[in-house]
Image (cartoon, grey):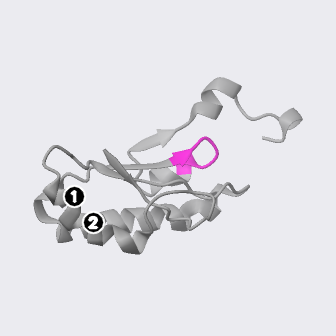
Amino acid sequence: MLLEVNASREANKSGFAPADVPGLLGPLSEMKSLRVEGLMTMAAQLDDPEACRPTFAELRGLRDRLRSDWGPLGARLEHLSMGMSNDFEVAVEEGATLVRIGSSLFEGPPGPEDGR
């Protein structure tokens, strides 16, 4: 399972607030059949993928802190799911292990006729 974190802080997105995630250790550790394997986020939909970097860097930093603070549970946080078709290169540079590129696969490469 991945915990969704609203690192972009957009009202239209769901997920835990970054500041609330460290407090989940107690409740999560009590759920013996639940295995948290990482964190996920979606950056704001922006024309410049580079503008998404702070969101991705924040999630990576949060994961890194949780790895040390959460002990054995933190050691499982192997995955960072972040980045979509428009910004996945930046997400990978910031440590993404999982990306969502459905638009690129199913809609084809960007073209001038559709503004992508």
Horizontal and vertical percent position of residue 56: 48, 61
Look at the numbered disc 1 and give the secondary structure of its residue.
helix
Depth check: give the residue in front, 90 or 62: 62
Q: Amino acid at mark 1?
A: Leu
Residue type, mark 2 in image: Leu
Q: Using residue 90 as the reference point, say whether residue 35 is left or right of it.
A: left
Residue 9, percent from left and from top:
56, 68
Residue 87 covered by magenta stretch:
yes
Q: Depth check: 46 or 37 in front?
A: 37
Is residue 97 in view? yes
Where does the image place residue 43, in percent across and percent down from the top left? Answer: 57, 57
Residue depicted at 19% across the width and 71% down the height? 69
Which residue is more in the foreground, 3 or 61?
A: 3
Q: Is residue 97 above or below residue 69?
A: above
Residue shown at the point (26%, 48%) measured from the top left = 37
| Residue under label 1 | 28
Quadrant including the N terminus: top left
Q: In which quarter of the view is residue 8 placed? A: bottom right
How many circles with numbers are drawn on the protein?
Answer: 2
Where is residue 41 shown, x and y percent of the image?
A: 48, 55
Q: Quadrant of residue 67?
A: bottom left
Per the rendered image, the range of residues in magenta is 83-89
Residue at numbered disc 2: 24
The residue shown at (32%, 63%) is 63
Crowd tier of the residue under label 2, counting other residues whose Cα lies within 10 Å: few below 14, some 14–19, many 20 or above: few
Marks 2 and 1 in Cβ contact (< 8 Å):
yes
> Visible in this render: residue 67?
no
Callout 2: SS: helix
- Label 1 packing within 10 angstroms: few (<14), some (14-19), many (20+): some
Q: Is residue 1 left or right of residue 88?
A: left
Q: Quadrant of residue 70?
A: bottom left
